[in-house]
Image (cartoon, rainbow, N blue to C red):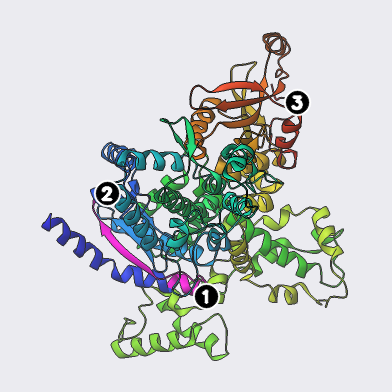
């Protein structure tokens, strides 16, 4: 064990310089990451971190051990290599696996720096993390929760098995929070008075009702006859929400009870039970930030990793092949790959912005109109003019004199002080070594500012995008021209191109990074062009052919399919419809049906968990699509898809068996989510 720690410390020391230089490069590129503390860990410790969701301590529960065994087997059989774990904290903590090659470690470090920038600047993370003075500290928060729940489980008056059962039930529902509301909107375990005094009339609507009854000064006999416990349960304010409540877990915390098998009735929870519910719910909000921005966050980190490792040569010549293999594996993973989709969408945002900037300037050239744009503008000459300045493109020891000339003229693309130090160092040692100046041989970006780096990596000068201006349609040109009112004109194309903003693409990316989540990101930027050039399509299971088939290549269908994958973390959207259903104190949940049916077996098991947090019968309203045998046979003969019938059903669980009932038409109308209908099956199935 001692040898392992010595090796880990030696590995960590060797990464000090790459980590410092990656931070310098990230900031020059315009990123503003949290400080990052890097830790080098062995296989077992990495597997433990993965099992704990990226943290070193969590509350006691059996599933952490299950997660560990699963990850350990994947690691042993080469089915899932862990490169890093990084958490959303200030400072962020990143754990690197000791066995990674130096090329992999550098790739991970550049990736982590971009993640830390996303954590610090994305508004959706602000909903789920305390960004007050000192910044978020999720590790400390989760550790406090672990201490609280451990202390509860160790209490002599508490059955440890009951704690585990409660944790099981809450964990099964941790995606039923309201992801569009800040965590502060919920009762916090930071206020122990709230957690311990669950009968405070100011917080408990039922207690408020009892208080008003007490003011009537009724005899105990009359009170028992008229205002019995069942009546009080049914009268609790807020139990019948006027609008569907998306935060199911908070509703269960506020109005739920515990079923007592001895009495066969629902009884009030113990204060410790509310503490456990609040703690796990709070953690669900922390992880919601990760879940709701997975494509954006991983795509963002992959994009800037590629700029730093490949574009700026952070991977040395002897490391580049290893890095290329690393990136190919990341982007080549099968299925819905958030790294690949996110990387391509970010590049698309950059490309669209840069192209729009150039088009807007060219349309302001005297005599150029949308109708004659392609005939009047020599796009080959435009592409050549957009190439970076040779001294900027080849920044390094060989271009120091040219860069010095640009700096003397006040060129904003050049870091004049760095160039001056590098020239002085070259004079001192006679060979252009560091000599106390920046090591421009290994780190040429030190000679350039963000403006210079933006020109060096300008998207329209990359070989794969040089033809992007040729693909612009006359309709697009006409649309851009419509917004040009009383603008300054250019006399020549050269004058127009001289004003092109090479940082426009990156600036737009920073704006998008600050305000979007995956759903809004995909909805805004997954365009027809993106779908067409990326060869994206949807597929569905064909009941007629009994196999999966391509359903559509239409951009709207692809967009809806992806939105369905990411709306509500990709889980069914369930809301609270009534806490006093049928005037019996029963809970009624509604599945917001959007064309895709529930997995009914999973739903029934989850309903049993809800019962444990409500203490009384629970119901779930949903809609299923049923296909008759005749409809399937007819569809097979015609080579089409069968027409299904949408049928409303209500599942009920009262502690025995899950039963199925017809759904009231009024309830069905409430759960039909037409405004978010992401059903992607086209009207005419592609046979």
Crowdedness of circle 1 by 10 Å Cα count: few (<14), some, many (20+)? many
Residue at which label 3 appears: 684
Point out the residue furthest to the left here.
2
Q: In this view, does 334 lie above or below 287?
A: above
Of callouts 1 and 3, which one flags the residue occurring earlier in the amino acid sequence? 1
- Residue for point 44% across, 42% down: 171
Residue at which label 2 appears: 154
Residue at which label 1 appears: 392
**Quarter of the image with the N terminus in it:** bottom left
Q: Which label lies toward us, 1 or 3?
A: 3
Range covered by the magenta-colored residues:
25-43
Horizontal and vertical percent position of residue 242: 72, 46
Of callouts 2 and 1, which one flags the residue occurring earlier in the amino acid sequence? 2
Whether pointer 1 and pointer 3 mark residues with C-beta atoms closer than 8 Å, the reply is no
Horizontal and vertical percent position of residue 647: 70, 22
Crowdedness of circle 2 by 10 Å Cα count: few (<14), some, many (20+)? few
Q: How far apart are marks 1 and 3 (CA)?
A: 54 Å
Tell me, yes or no, whether the highlighted magenta stretch contains residue 301: no
Q: How far apart are marks 2 and 1 (CA)?
A: 65 Å
């Amino acid at each position: 064990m001692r040898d392992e720690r010595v090796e880990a410390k030696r590995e960590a020391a060797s990464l000090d310089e790459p980590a410092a230089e990656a931070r310098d490069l990230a900031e020059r590129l315009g990123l503003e990451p949290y400080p990052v503390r890097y830790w080098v860990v062995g296989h077992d410790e990495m597997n433990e971190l993965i099992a704990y969701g990226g943290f070193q301590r969590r509350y006691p529960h059996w599933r952490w051990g299950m997660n560990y065994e699963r990850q350990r087997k994947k690691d042993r059989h080469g089915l899932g290599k862990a490169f890093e774990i990084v958490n959303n904290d200030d400072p962020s903590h990143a754990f690197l696996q000791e066995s990674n090659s130096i090329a992999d470690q550098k790739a991970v470090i550049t990736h982590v720096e971009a993640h830390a920038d996303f954590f610090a600047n994305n508004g959706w993370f602000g909903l789920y993390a305390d960004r007050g003075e000192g910044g978020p500290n999720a590790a400390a928060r989760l550790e406090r929760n672990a201490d609280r729940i451990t202390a509860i489980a160790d209490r002599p008056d508490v059955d440890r098995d009951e704690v585990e059962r409660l944790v099981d039930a809450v964990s099964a529902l941790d995606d039923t929070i309201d992801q569009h509301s800040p965590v502060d909107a919920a009762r916090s375990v930071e206020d122990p008075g709230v957690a311990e005094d669950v009968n405070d009339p100011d917080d408990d609507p039922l207690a408020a009702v009892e208080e008003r009854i007490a003011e009537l000064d009724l005899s105990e006999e009359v009170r028992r006859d008229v205002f019995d416990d069942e009546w009080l349960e049914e009268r609790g304010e807020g139990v019948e929400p006027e609008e569907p409540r998306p935060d199911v877990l908070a509703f269960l915390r506020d109005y739920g009870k515990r079923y007592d098998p001895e009495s066969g009735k629902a009884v009030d929870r113990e204060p410790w039970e509310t503490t456990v519910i609040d703690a796990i719910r709070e953690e669900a909000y922390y992880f919601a930030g990760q879940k709701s921005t997975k494509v954006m966050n991983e795509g963002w980190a992959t994009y800037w990793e590629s700029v730093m490792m490949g574009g700026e040569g952070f991977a040395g010549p002897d490391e580049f092949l290893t890095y290329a293999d690393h990136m190919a594996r990341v982007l080549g993973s099968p299925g819905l790959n958030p790294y690949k989709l996110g990387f391509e969408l970010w590049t698309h945002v950059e490309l669209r912005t840069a192209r729009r900037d150039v088009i807007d300037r060219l349309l302001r050239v005297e005599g150029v109109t949308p109708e004659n744009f392609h005939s009047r503008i020599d796009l080959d000459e435009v592409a050549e003019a957009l190439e970076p300045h040779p001294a900027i493109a080849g920044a390094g020891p060989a271009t120091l004199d040219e860069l010095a000339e640009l700096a003397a003229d006040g060129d904003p693309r050049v870091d004049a002080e760095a160039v001056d130090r590098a020239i002085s160092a070259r004079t001192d040692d006679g060979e252009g070594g560091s000599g106390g100046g920046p090591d421009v041989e290994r780190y040429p970006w030190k000679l350039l500012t963000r403006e210079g780096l933006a020109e060096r990596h300008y998207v329209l000068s990359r070989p794969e995008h040089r033809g992007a201006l040729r693909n612009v349609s006359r309709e697009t040109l006409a649309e851009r021209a419509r917004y040009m009112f009383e603008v300054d004109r250019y006399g020549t194309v050269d004058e127009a191109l001289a004003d092109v903003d090479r940082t426009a693409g990156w600036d737009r990316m920073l704006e998008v990074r600050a305000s979007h989540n995956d759903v809004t990101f995909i909805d805004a930027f997954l365009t027809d062009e993106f779908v067409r050039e990326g060869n994206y399509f949807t597929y569905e299971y064909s009941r007629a052919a009994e196999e999966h088939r391509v359903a559509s290549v239409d951009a709207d269908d692809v967009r809806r399919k992806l939105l369905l994958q990411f709306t509500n973390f990709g889980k069914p959207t369930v809301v609270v419809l009534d806490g006093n259903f049928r005037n019996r104190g029963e809970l009624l949940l509604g599945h917001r049906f959007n064309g895709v049916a529930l997995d009914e077996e999973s739903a029934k098991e989850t309903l049993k968990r809800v019962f444990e947090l409500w203490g009384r019968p629970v119901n779930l309203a949903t809609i299923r699509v049923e296909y008759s045998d005749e409809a399937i046979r007819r569809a097979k003969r015609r080579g089409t898809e069968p027409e299904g019938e949408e049928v409303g059903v209500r599942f009920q669980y009262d502690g025995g068996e899950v039963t199925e009932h017809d759904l009231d038409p009024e309830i069905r109308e409430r759960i039909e989510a037409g405004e978010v209908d992401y059903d992607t099956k086209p009207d005419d199935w592609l046979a």
